[in-house]
Amino acid sequence: MTSFVYRRQMTIEWGHCDPAGIVFNARFFEFFDVSTWLLFEAALGVKRSDLNATFGIIGLPLVDARAAFRKPAKFGDTIEIASRVKTFRRSSFDVEHLITVGGELAVEGGETRVWAGKHASDPHRISALAVPADVVKRFGLQQV
Amino acid sequence: MTSFVYRRQMTIEWGHCDPAGIVFNARFFEFFDVSTWLLFEAALGVKRSDLNATFGIIGLPLVDARAAFRKPAKFGDTIEIASRVKTFRRSSFDVEHLITVGGELAVEGGETRVWAGKHASDPHRISALAVPADVVKRFGLQQV
Amino acid sequence: MTSFVYRRQMTIEWGHCDPAGIVFNARFFEFFDVSTWLLFEAALGVKRSDLNATFGIIGLPLVDARAAFRKPAKFGDTIEIASRVKTFRRSSFDVEHLITVGGELAVEGGETRVWAGKHASDPHRISALAVPADVVKRFGLQQV
Amino acid sequence: MTSFVYRRQMTIEWGHCDPAGIVFNARFFEFFDVSTWLLFEAALGVKRSDLNATFGIIGLPLVDARAAFRKPAKFGDTIEIASRVKTFRRSSFDVEHLITVGGELAVEGGETRVWAGKHASDPHRISALAVPADVVKRFGLQQV
């Protein structure tokens, strides 16, 4: 069983770039966020804006994000972002985002997120919930 | 009676600029939004995140925004944004934002916003409410 | 002869939205900018990052931008942006961007831009140049 | 000798926040970038837009960025960002950014950047240069 990968291509736009003519670093974290929503939409077959309602969660809050910038991406470049969940733990998981430009690795990104719902006794608090086994299976993974 | 003006200075940062080395246009609309919140905070003496609760509104939704770009602002420039309400109508108002760089007019911006609350009979809908006379007076203006 | 229209569809992402759950206004101006580049790429048959080199210009600087917000767009909405040049003058032109959500007009946007090159005698200055007749024709328009 | 720390306070604005009402993660990386420029400006006594010219570099390109999100920051919150260089190596260095809200740690950020100039023999390439000893000293540090 192989892990589910979501790939998309996009073009680097003028407004993504800084005075050095390359993508401003914060934009990559925005690209990662979009790709994580698309990855879950594709793996679970649920429109991204319906994920919370469908699974009874309040979201997938980010607890850690990171990126290593290997090569710059510049205005007009077509990039590919390949995203997958690397590991599901009980209630959190790691997403990997690999960005390539012309087939060469440009950015290695990662996010750690939580499967989060309302706290059982206090609706104003957020609780980490167990990721359903069915969800994990859809990504071609086993919980660790 | 003169109209209340809120002025602030800020420096143009690397991430505000595009490959031409000047502020990317969308950023100016973000600057305007911040200045409108600060203008209301200053004129009404209420922290901007408490405005809605204090006045029983759900916000000041934007219905129109515009900007004329006279001179570019670039990385490291100190800009001044002078903001004021130009006109209060029954339930909407026009905000003017003048941005200067080194004393010269760089951007002439404008926003039209609505004083909005929950609809009386349907809480899922938004209604334009009458701007309280007291609010108008704080800006040194009269309703038209 | 009808004017050339460039249409694209996109989904509203989480990071486009503000605490009211709707697209933050500045994002629309970013969408407009992308659409203008795409419109010129499509009408002129030149990759957007090659436009300047191909036509010997230094860009299409924005001198005026505006938007009227009729209906909000929210997370998960599919929007369509239809963009066209409405008028070409000697060295400037007006772009119209109409955004619909579910077929209903949500945002009416406009940009005025300049066909700009290096100043003939001073390379550090920017000059408005005459838009080539051939460019105007590609948009199905006549100069006014 | 203690390491130079640059602290600034800022308010979380409406446009920084997502539909959950908290700062959208990509914004924090933008805050880090601003703070790094301010840290160098303050430590070296050179306006941030003059750093490159003063030191004969072409910038401080980011090769790695990361953040651990401990507590959310929301609209209207005053945050403090304390930034310092933790380690200078021969030609790269690590910046730490600690964000607190009401005195509590909210985000732990980090950046790795390079002291970069034009390549000696090929001006189109970028080279990692040795960080001048004088620069390191200004931060109250020693190279490792």
Image: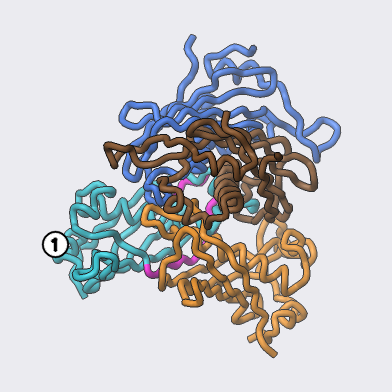
Chain colours: A blue, B orange, C cyan, D brown
List the single residue furthest toward the bottom: B1
Q: How many numbered circles are shown?
A: 1
Q: Is residue A43 magenta?
A: no
Residue at figure coordinates x 20%, y 49% from the top left? C45
Q: Is residue A42 visible?
A: no
Q: Identify residue for label 1.
A: C134
| Above or below, comparing residue B131 to residue B53 in the picture | below
Residue at figure coordinates x 48%, y 70% from the top left? B66
* Circle 1 chain: C
Q: Residue B58 falls in which quadrant of the image?
A: bottom right
Identify the element where label 1 is drawn.
Answer: helix
Most foreground residue, C111 or D85: D85
Q: Residue A112 falls in which quadrant of the image?
A: top right
> Callout 1 environment at 10 Å: few (<14), some (14 to 19), or many (20+)?
few
Counting from the top left corner in percent of width and height, residue A91 is at 69, 22
Counting from the top left corner in percent of width and height, residue C84 is at 30, 60
Quadrant holding the C terminus of chain D: top right
Q: Is residue D130 visible?
A: yes
| Above or below, comparing residue B21 to residue D115 in the picture | below
| Above or below, comparing residue A5 to residue A106 in the picture | above
**Magenta-drawn segment:** C63-79
List the single residue furthest toward the top: A1
Q: Is residue C70 magenta?
A: yes
Q: Which three-letter amino acid code belongs to the residue tagged 1?
A: Asp
